[in-house]
Image (cartoon, helix red, strand yellow):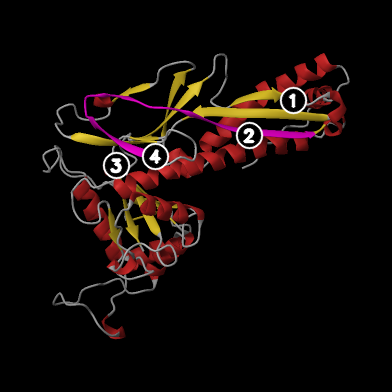
Amino acid sequence: MKITIKRTEDQLALVRAMGSNNREEAFEAQAAVAELLGPVVTEVINNAVTVGNLFTTLTYQADDNPSLPLDLFHDITEEDYINVYSQQVAGGLPYSQVFPAHNELKFSTYTLDSALAFDRKYAKKARVDVVSKTFTRMAQEVMLKQERTAFNVLATALVKGNSTGAAGGHLIGSASASTMVLDDFNRLITKSKRINSSWASGTPVGGSKVGVTDLLASPEMVEKLRGMAYNPINTAGANGTTPTGAASGLAAPETLREQLYSGAGLPSFYGINIIEVLEMGIGQRFNKIFGAVVASEGATVIGGGNSGTFALADDEVVIGVDRSRDVLLRPVVLDEGSTGELNVLVDDQFSVRQNKIGYYGKVEEGRVCIDDRALCGIVV
């Protein structure tokens, strides 16, 4: 991700004016740059492939009383109650509320911000690269905060989700510890079908759906998927018993192996989009957040290999998301006169003697999951 300012005469003159000794002229130039690059920073954040962008954006005006009519997102003939997960403060633990499907949901928003400054001498020398790096860093800091708050809601909804009442809730354990094979994918699809039942715990109108469109996985788990090109994939012999010995292993069909070989990036598998997330995996940030949610909720999550309970030292989670349903929502408050979700302003805390030019960016948003049936996962 990179924001670049073109070196045209107009742009260079505008950057030089930011460093002017005339305070009014300098402030006007700084405000013009903020107005110019604010929407660009917003566009960069919204188009980045991150966990935060799994959420659908809903916009509200400042000083509004934001709410969500749940009957527009659910079948109004449903008679059951649904769990809604909402985060009240940035970095806080999301909590769940129980609502009837026809009720109106009230939720809170919070502010994510970033403040950066650079020396005035760079503006006087028309160093557009320094100005570009400043706004790039602002976008990165906001995205980092958005990712953490978004994953908090995802992890909490997944851990507490238990639509079927079965042991383990929406999570299953891999058949073998530290290994994800085709059988685990198959069982995940079955789990998602059970989760996506009708309100009467029967077959939905139109038939059952797959329920998983995207899979969030660590690089190590994507490596296991690529390994299906040359590793055996069968879990049962001809008579239904567990195969034993190296000779009993059955390789994947040639067409599947060819797809895995040719698609090194592995954008999709079994019709499911694969999103490789570096923050996932043993010892990584998102895995630690998931473990903290499991501990704080006192949940019983089975570990990899279908044995024991989830342990940070040995287990990692792979999350399946159904993006065909608008259940992951991101309400955003738009300030009056703002041209984008991220409001970029000139930071006026610096005096002339400090020789600094600063910018302040903020976005007021929230994270809501209105139906945990869109989430399932595998603990490996």
On residue 94, the disc is 4
Question: Residue at label 3?
Answer: 372
Q: How many numbered marks, from 0 up? A: 4
Amino acid type, mark 4? Pro
**Discs 3/1, front:** 1
Mark 2 neighbour class, 10 Å CA radius: few under 14, some 14 to 19, many 20 or more:
some
What amino acid is at disc 2? Ser
In this rendering, would 266 be left or right of 31? left
Instruction: Name the spot of residue 71 as percent of width and height, x first.
Output: 24, 25
Among numbered discs 3 and 1, the one appearing first in the sequence:
1
Question: Where is residue 330, by image quadrant?
Answer: top left
Q: Residues within 10 Å of mark 1 (few under 14, many from 20)?
A: few
The residue identified by callout 2 is 114
Look at label 1 and name its amino acid. Gln
* Whether residue 222 can be seen here: yes
Q: Earlier in the sequence, mark 4 or mark 1?
A: 4
* Part of the protein shown in magenta: 94-118
* Cα separation between marks 4 and 3: 13 Å
Quadrant placement of the N terminus? top right
- In the image, taking residue 24 as reference, residue 52 lies left or right, namely left
Separation of residues labelled 4 and 1 (CA atoms): 34 Å
Q: Mark 2 or mark 4, which has the lower sequence index?
A: 4
Instruction: Using the numbered discs, state the Cα–Cα distance from disc 2 to disc 4 in whole angstroms.
Output: 23 Å
Q: Residue at x 29, y 57 (%)?
A: 300
For marks 4 and 3, give the one nearer the viewer.
4
Q: Are marks 3 and 1 in contact (CB under 8 Å)?
A: no
Q: Quadrant of the C terminus?
A: bottom left
The residue pinned by badge 1 equals 349
Judged from the image, the secondary structure of the residue bearing numbered disc 2 is strand
Mark-to-mark CA distance, 2 and 1: 14 Å
Mark 3 and mark 1: Cα distance apart in space: 44 Å
Main secondary structure of the magenta stretch: strand
